[in-house]
Amino acid sequence: MSELKVIHLLGRLYPSGMERMLASAAQDFVEQGIRSIVIGQGEGHPFRDDLANAGYDVRVVPSLRTLAGCFALSRIVSAERPDVVHIHTESAFLPAVLSSYLSARTRVVRTVHSVFRPHGKAAFSRRVQAMLADRFVAQFVAPSPDVAKNELNWNRKLQVVYNWVSSDYIAAKRHSGSNASPLHAVLVGNCASVKNHEFALKHLMANGYVVSHHGNEAHATALEREMLESLASQGRLRYRGSEPPLQSLKNGGVFVLPSLHEGMSVALAEAIALGTPCLVADSIGLSWAKGIQGVEHISLLEEDAWSSALRETGYLPVAGGSAPPDLSPRRGAEEYAELYRTVANHIRSGRGAIGRQV
């Protein structure tokens, strides 16, 4: 099996979805013959050391919204001559593609990690960037069927490669008879408005829950911070910070995900892998988990249903359901390695430098 060199281009390196996935699958990629370089953009990279400790060659460049960032990325691509540049960031998509492809005629893979439905100028900008850049992308990838379906609006056909979780979550799977408190709720996710944490916190505070809150609060609203401070003052904030949620999910009575939309939530996948009961919004990007044992979906429009589910006596998990999909990092690394080899061999065999399907 020949070795391939892959550059992963991300934004700021936070302890969130793709960064944590890369860290968990580092050895699996090595076993698949993939040598990886991770590039972060801009300043402030709290997860940089974690990726380096996992074995990745980690570099940082200025934001690709600047010429300095584009030149820095071009220099790395020209020097490293990777087989594939894998773009994970939505921001500055056009500069990212052009800086990668034109520097070494390398193959470009792009994973669209969330559901994007911009309006007005933002929609116009995305459509223009797609028109100019998509022809240089060898393969688009989605982490869930919801994302793939949404990207059809941009005339993109995506291959689905489901997200995965660290093997630690699979190994720590809970069994029936767990002594977790039904009044202990877990929230996970960096505090962007799309995560909608205030919605869940309102019900949790009213019904007497203790809360573990895992996520970077840099973009938290004043209301969310006020709610967390109130919980802390009452002794009801079990955890607050950005560490992985393994222990909280293991001890929690319910994982709550009230997001307005997602791509494929890694936090939800972690909770499912552990066997933690899940109460999630019936939002786009979360339908992949419908019917899985222990997962309950409720529309965000049904306030009373949320209040009833998060009742004062504690959350009661839904019964029945199907087994979850394979969420292992080995599976994810194998699928991406196969995709990278297909893409790289396409150009090596002389079948053209540009394509959009594997």
Image: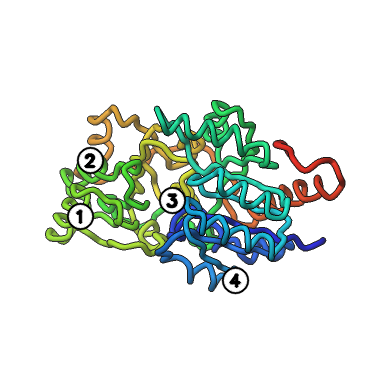
What distance separates the C-alpha of mark 2 from that of mark 3? 23 Å
Instruction: Judge whether 312 appears above or below 104 on screen.
Output: above
Query: What is the C-alpha distance between the residues marked 4 and 3?
Result: 23 Å
Q: Which residue is mark 3?
A: 267
Q: In the image, what residue occupies the spot 36% across and 53% down?
A: 190
Task: Please name the residue shown 71% across and 49% down the image.
Answer: 107
What numbered label is drawn on residue 55?
4
> Residue 268: x and y, percent?
44, 47
Tell me the residue that label 1 is attached to.
Answer: 228
* Quadrant of the frame with the N terminus: bottom right
Side of 185 relative to 203 (left or right): right
Question: Image quarter for residue 44?
Answer: bottom left
Q: Which dot, 4 or 2, sits closer to the camera?
A: 4
State the residue lying farthest toward the bottom: 53
Nearer the observer, disc 1 or disc 4?
A: 4
| Residue at mark 4 to residue at mark 2: CA–CA distance | 45 Å
Real-space Cα separation, disc 1 to disc 4, in angstroms:
35 Å
Tag 2 or tag 4, which sits nearer the N-term?
4
Which badge, 2 or 3, is on the more N-terminal residue? 3
Query: Tag 2's secondary structure?
Result: loop
For mark 1, give the secondary structure: helix
Residue 20 visible: no
Q: Which residue is mark 2?
A: 311
Amino acid carrying label 4: it is Gly
> Looking at the picture, which amino acid does disc 3 mark?
Ala
Disc 3, SS: helix
Judge by depth and name the residue closer to the eye, 30 or 106: 106
Query: Residue 90 has which mark?
Result: none
